[in-house]
Image (cartoon, rainbow, N blue to C red):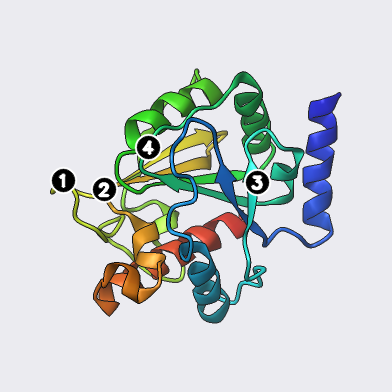
Amino acid sequence: MRKQFLLLLFVLSFSLGFAQEIALLKYQGGGDWYSNPTALPNLIRFSNQQIGTAIDPQPVTVETASPELFNYAFVHMTGHGNVFFSEEDAANLRTYLLSGGFLHADDNYGMAPYFKEAIQSVFPEKELVELSPSHPIFNQTFSFPKGLPKIHEHDALPPQAFGIFHKDRLVVLFTFESDLGNGWEDPEVHNDPEEIRLKALQMGANILSYVFSL
């Protein structure tokens, strides 16, 4: 009954015009889910200006087990450390994703092993698979023929984008060794060259465009 109610809530949120609202996921485990505080507001501003989205300029924070999760078509998470999903968290997140929601997990360096374990509790029957550069998410308004752009150097590894699919729909995007969120932050935070920040923002806008066009 609870799952049916949450699904109905999710469908109603779309029909009432709330499809272009996004949220930051507050997860358990002690990881710094609040990293990159200027990232999402900057991405929203860029997307509204450049690709015509109409996203509320201030993203909200939502906890993994909260019914409020179903109010948002796009949920973003980031951090450097531990991620933990309780049974309640995992069940709620799974229902959200199978009902049409989308999760973008952006490794801010150090989150990868914890996220991979946590997402297995949500989808024990599925695996993260690497996305080909030909995937539509890299070819929305902005073209990235080589796939995910490199924004920040950490371990001299190539950037990779992984996904989890449900009925051919991408429901989870995990970006690794790219650190898009750092590129979305205010220029003075990381002092990235403008062309690097632009690539990060364009890739972020592509992700939003992809999600909102599903």
Disc 3 marks a residue whose amino acid type is: Val
- Residue toward you, 54 or 132: 54
Cβ–Cβ below 8 Å for labels 2 and 4? Answer: no
Task: Say whether residue 105 is left or right of residue 9.
Answer: left
For numbered disc 3, what is the local secondary structure?
strand
Q: CA distance from mark 1 to mark 3?
A: 31 Å
Where is mark 2, residue-wise? 177
Residue tagged 1: 155
Q: Is disc 1 in contact with disc 2, using a CB cutoff of under 8 Å?
A: yes
Q: For the residues marked 2 and 4, what is the alpha-carbon distance in whole angstroms?
A: 15 Å
Q: Residue at x 38, y 29 (%)?
A: 114
The reply to whether residue 213 is in sight is no
Answer with mark 2 or mark 4, whichever residue precedes in sequence. 4
Residue under label 3, please give it: 62
Which residue is tagged 4?
81
Say which of 148 and 110 sits in front: 110
Q: Which mark is residue 135?
A: none
Q: Are marks 3 and 2 in contact (CB under 8 Å)?
A: no
Tell me the CA gap for discs 4 and 1: 16 Å
Nearest to N terminus: mark 1 or mark 2 = 1
Q: CA distance from mark 1 to mark 2?
A: 8 Å
Instruction: Give residue 10's position: percent from left, percent from top.
Output: 77, 44
In-image side of 181 versus 193 (left or right): right
Q: Along the line of sight, which residue is nearer the eye, 133 or 60?
A: 60
The mark lying in front, picked from 2 and 4, is: 4
The disc, 4 or 1, on the residue closer to the chain's N-terminal end is: 4
Q: Residue 33 in the image: x percent, y percent?
A: 48, 45
